[in-house]
Image: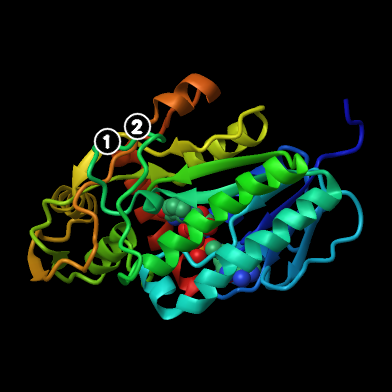
Amino acid sequence: MRLDPTRVLVTGGAGFIGSTLCDRLLRDGCQVVCADNFSTGREANIAHLRAAPGFQLITADVVEPLDIPGPIHEIFHLASPASPVDYQRLPLETLRAGSAGTDNVLALARAKDARFLLASTSEVYGDPLEHPQPESYLGNVNTVGPRSVYDEAKRYAEALTVAYHRAYGTDVAIARIFNTFGPRMRLDDGRVVPSFIAQALAGRPFSINGTGKQTRSLCYVDDMVDALLALMRSPHRGPVNLGSTDEMAVLDIAGLIADQTGNPLRFVYAPLGQDDPEKRRPDTRLAHRLLGWSPAVGIREGIARTISWFRTDLGSFR
Ligand code: NAD
């Protein structure tokens, strides 16, 4: 049993999920090293932590080898552009973060004898032909499509993670994260919840790509952080799907946000993006069985908390 506090590295710790994870780790008494290059994350996400005892920020690109003195017990590797708008703006950076970046962070885990958790994605399933997607589904990815830089970077990162375990015995886990939402998303990151909230708060119609009948299963960020911690603190390697199983049509998500903001339900339609998945819902029975985890915050409550955050905190984030 370890007597010194757990020292945890969070790569991508200034991002939406990463900063929420840093908050939680510090609340739990861990020491936290946040490494971020601020390509898609924000200083404002971690500004409140800068003076917190036990918090250290390293401005670094994981594509370069990381030199972090002292012990590291756990590594959450989240550093990667994550929204379609970001990875299409940063295609080569996305491929490098998943490949060289993951290699560097795994090498650090090996050197420090730390447990390593990869933040992978439902996008490894591509436009799935099996629904809902269990971990055993091997995916349907277009290797040269507009989303391929992200999907293939994460598929490679998964392969590398498993290879470090097989070759060096590195202690690893793979989380396949499905759509997550909540405070600290960027209003302009192109994902459905912040886009609709931005439109609602500006009194504009909701923009729908395609028919709006395509589905998403949305997990509130605090639940996702619980799941990542549960996987890190378990003996399991995964891959494990993490996400909500409450599948909703995009039109219904707009309806919920219209109800909660008072914005009238009007739509403008645009074509569906190429390779935009029609259906997205995880099979989370493995997470439930191995980790005893399932989401606690319902979609209505999560959307209400997110709208409230955008209303009250947005000013300081512009
Ligand atoms: P985000 O963009 O808010 O956070 C990513 C963070 O990584 C940012 O702070 C960014 O500056 C940093 N970063 C990017 N490239 C880097 C590099 N080369 N070196 C150092 N830092 C770098 O995204 P997020 O939604 O918080 O996603 C976090 C992780 O979870 C990502 O790996 C993403 O692929 C994964 N994920 C997220 C979702 C979701 O719904 N949000 C779904 C599936 C997987």
Left or right of 31 in this view: 116:
left
Check contact, mark 2 vs mark 1: CB within 8 A.
yes
Residue at 53% from the left image edge and 22% from the top image edge: 290
Image vertical order of residue 307 relative to residue 65, above or below: above
Secondary structure at badge 2 equals loop
Q: Secondary structure at mark 1?
A: loop
C-alpha span from label 2 to label 1: 5 Å
For label 1, the residue is 132
- Up the image or down, 213 lies above or below 311; here it is above
Tell which circle, 2 or 1, labels the residue nearer the N-terminal end: 1
Q: In the image, what residue occupies the spot 58% across and 56% down?
A: 78
Crowd around label 1: few <14 · some 14–19 · many ≥20 (10 Å): some
Which one is in front, 303 or 31? 31
In-image side of 43 versus 31 (left or right): left
Q: Is residue 33 left or right of residue 266?
A: right
Res. 69 image quadrant: bottom right
Query: Looking at the picture, which amino acid does disc 1 mark?
Result: Pro
Q: Is residue 260 depicted above or below 1 in this figure?
A: below
User: Mark 2 sits on what residue?
Assistant: 283
Q: Position of residue 308 (x, y in %)?
A: 38, 54
Q: Nearer the viewer, residue 40 or 317?
A: 40
